[in-house]
Amino acid sequence: MTGKYENKNLKPGSFPYIWERISHNTGAMVGIAVICLIIVLSIFSPYILKHNYSTINLSNAGALPSLDHPFGCDEVGRDILARVLYGARYTLSIGLLSTLFASVVGIFLGSVAGYFGGVVDMFLMRFLDIFQAFPQLLLAMTLVAIFGTGLDKCILALGISNIPGYARMTRANVLNIRSNEYIEAAVSIKCSTWRIITKHVVPNAFSPLIIAMAMGIANSGLAASALSFVGLGIQPPKPEWGAMLASARNYIRAYPHTVIFPGSFIMLTVLSFNLIGDALRDAMDPKLRD
Amino acid sequence: MDMEMNTNNLLSVRHLTVEYTSGGKTVHAVNGLSFDMDKGETLGLVGETGAGKTSIARAIMRILPDHATKSVAGKIIFKGRDILQLSNMEMQAVRGSQISMIFQDPMTALNPVRTVVSQVAEGLKLHHKLTKADATNAAIDMLETVGIPEDRSGEYPHQFSGGMKQRVVIAMALACNPEFLIADEPTTALDVTIQAQVLSLIKRLRDERGTSMILITHDLGVVADTCDKVAVIYAGQIIEYGSKEDIFDRASHPYTKGLFSTLPDINKRTDRLSPIKGLPPDPTQLSKGCSFQPRCPYAIGRCCDEAVELTEFTPGHYTRCCNIVIEGGVVECPH
Amino acid sequence: MSTLIEVQHLKKYFESKRGTVQAVDDVSLKIEQGTTMGLVGESGCGKSTLGRTMIHLQGSTAGKIIFEGEDVTHLKKQQLSKLRDNMQIIFQDPYSSLNPRFTVKDTIQEPLILSGKNRTKAELEEEAHRLMELVGIEERLRMSYPHELDGGRRQRVGIARALALNPKFIVCDEPVSALDVSIQAQILNLLMDLQDQYGLTYLFVTHDLSVVCHISDYICVMYLGQMVETCLTEELFIRQLHPYSKALLSAILPIDIHQKTERILLKGEVTSPINPKPGCRFAPRCIYACDRCAEPVELTEVLPGHFVSCCRVKEINSL
């Protein structure tokens, strides 16, 4: 039976193929628009905004939103709008880079474990078990405590704590793909093991991971905020959203807007990635297609 | 069919039309199908994948997928009542106790987390309002009838082989002694020797209980073995209908004839088979003329333009082909 | 006619948690060049495993594989690569036998690229075009992906891929079982045409007796890893000697409604191939079973060219 997608000559799992499918999903389009907007604003905020994100002005401490300060001022008088927009850089970059790192390493380990099986599989999986024995956030905290605080250490710590998830998912996909006959066919036409893994296994194992990565960016962004909130991760006075929440924690009653705005942006970002992730899942699950 | 709606019929289907939506397009699965069934008769619905046979079965059982089904039209009169007009509650009472179904894939037709006896007993509790103990006993008897010993009745589906699972499915279908049974490719997923066992079981139970049956299959050998009447389905329509002898000895529609000549026959070793050229039509783009025309070796001009009606050309033998009709009252098939 | 490929006492055992699965147990057969050997049996009999072991897609546990007179059972990488040029396989499932991310062109060209003959891009295109024409795939489908093609066309792509290395021997593992009846005939005809044109030798694995009757010259019947009967195809359909073959053939439902067959219904279910009891594995379901069935059985030539492994074959058939 041919549907409206089946006639289009698009490579399964490729970007045009995915775009074709999610472009009809309102939630995904909204999510993508919001993320793009946040990115653009974050990049250009120091040039277009009146106030700087780090200028302290105690006379404005706790000022409510006004025309001059659309989001108001925080407990030491810094403009919240500028801080929130600048702070997006941290959340987004940690989210994206740690996910990228975790997925590249995870896909490699998972593919090797899944394709070769046997001792290699057992060894790798038990090794990853060590990492998975810790709750993810606690593991990230421990790693940060070892590596130190700062943007790059945060990315590394969150990346490492996420590797086992991607590795296992890839391994499961690879086990599935290995049972397909085209892998046997590749062996019979003299394909080398390396070529089979890179050309036949990984490209097909990768597609389902895209959903996990979209959700993973959201989770890592959230985890970054959590780390900063407890004082690990990005330290104040840097305007990372979690750090902003930590500083504003004592002033919830007096100056609620200092908590509401950074919190809302965390929520908005995570929600956007989740909407994109859901749309991807719907788009790529053949059973949901009709 | 232009037959009078005979109230003695057990089942009368009139102008059944089923449409699905798929990726924005409409799939015309069943297109104005009509047939009758008498009590005690076995009708074979023969056709290839995508012909619409399973859709017919699901329409009768009212188990078409809600989210994908665009429309269902026509009448399905069962024992004087139009099934398509019944409420869900009323249909619940019919399904399982008066009309039952045997599904194709025994691996997925059984619930893996319940024992086989509980699955057979479920229908009995629901329809015959038996207590758990009575239902269980009746279920055990039913399982014995299909060849599953009592000491295995408390086991789970994964502990049985494919053939035995199918027997459980048959037990479930026949537990409440329905008058009408729909068997959707009941032996396709089974090995040849197991197929023989299961078909023999189905026939025995059918004969003992006088159950009327629709048997859906693509295997003409199964039809020859089990059915009284045959309807050949192509692109959601009946293109030939008749008794088993009419279809097997005197097939008249080019598709039916094509089907027979395309099958390797162990009694006739030919050098090359004669396949039907081309592919089945796209159900989202059916033409208004004859749906078989692009593949028909006998097609003429009017085959593309006009829709052909199902016409009776010998008593009880109907065909949907204009070549025969042109000939008028000629009984001998020009092909 | 010379023997192209032969296996002697081939065994393939798998280790599993519940014990050793004896998938193929002491099977010997010969296939003459240019002929088709049909391998029939029901699910679990080991026919697919035998086919794959013969072409080194799986390693054998014991026994010999002889190709064109040479013992090819244990080969080094270099020699195996050369052997693969000669032995190919066509798979059953047209859906999982093609990489969903490869176009038709990619799938057909891949073996050409890996063949070791350094062809230029133009030569690759030309060769792929030739193969597509040979198997009957329209040129316009060159850049199509598998999900855009129907089962019959996908199977043709699989056949083109198998032919790319110019093999002498092809294992056809149920190549038409997953196809619609009207397409089956097209593919069977194609396989037969290719055999005539190129002198190919086939091992045709199937459970469908009417298909194997049509396409094969010789037949082997397998049951639970053991070979029970082998002879010319015509002979098997005229008279079967082994009780299992009799049951198998009587289970075929004829299309001729006036033909009455005595159906032999086997009792019970197929026993497990894990740690099986010694002797004939069909004995638990056989109506002729006796005490001698527990002793190991050999394939013996009961009639000229007709081999059976049954201790009571002469009595049962009044020979």
Image (cartoon, coloured by chain):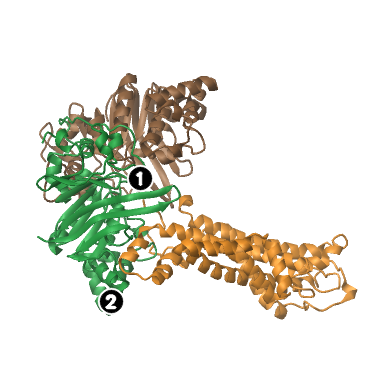
The quadrant where residue A9 appears: bottom left
Question: Which residue is painted at 80% across and 75% down in the image?
Answer: A237
Towards the viewer: C170 or A232: C170
Residue A126 spot, x, y in % from top left: 57, 61
Task: Specify few, some or many for label 1: CA neighbours under 10 Å numbering under 14, 14-19, or 20 or more.
Answer: many
- Looking at the rendered structure, the secondary structure element under dot 2 is loop
Which chain is represented by green in the image? C
Which quarter of the rendering shows the C terminus of chain C? top left
- Looking at the image, residue B309 lies above or below residue A177: above
Which chain is represented by brown in the image? B
Question: Which residue is painted at 61% across and 72% down in the image?
Answer: A97
Residue C231 spot, x, y in % from top left: 15, 47
Q: On residue C211, which mark appears?
A: none
Q: On residue C273, which mark appears?
A: 1
Which quarter of the rendering shows the N terminus of chain C? bottom left
- Looking at the image, residue B264 lies above or below residue A233: above
Amino acid carrying mark 1 in the image? Pro
Towards the viewer: B192 or C128: B192
Amino acid carrying mark 2 in the image? Gly
Q: Is residue B167 left or right of residue B327?
A: right
Q: Give the colour chain A carries in the figure.
A: orange
Q: Is residue C309 left or right of residue C56?
A: left
- Looking at the rendered structure, the secondary structure element under dot 1 is loop
Q: Earlier in the sequence, mark 1 or mark 2?
A: 2
Residue A246 spot, x, y in % from top left: 80, 66
What residue sits right under mark 2 in the picture? C116
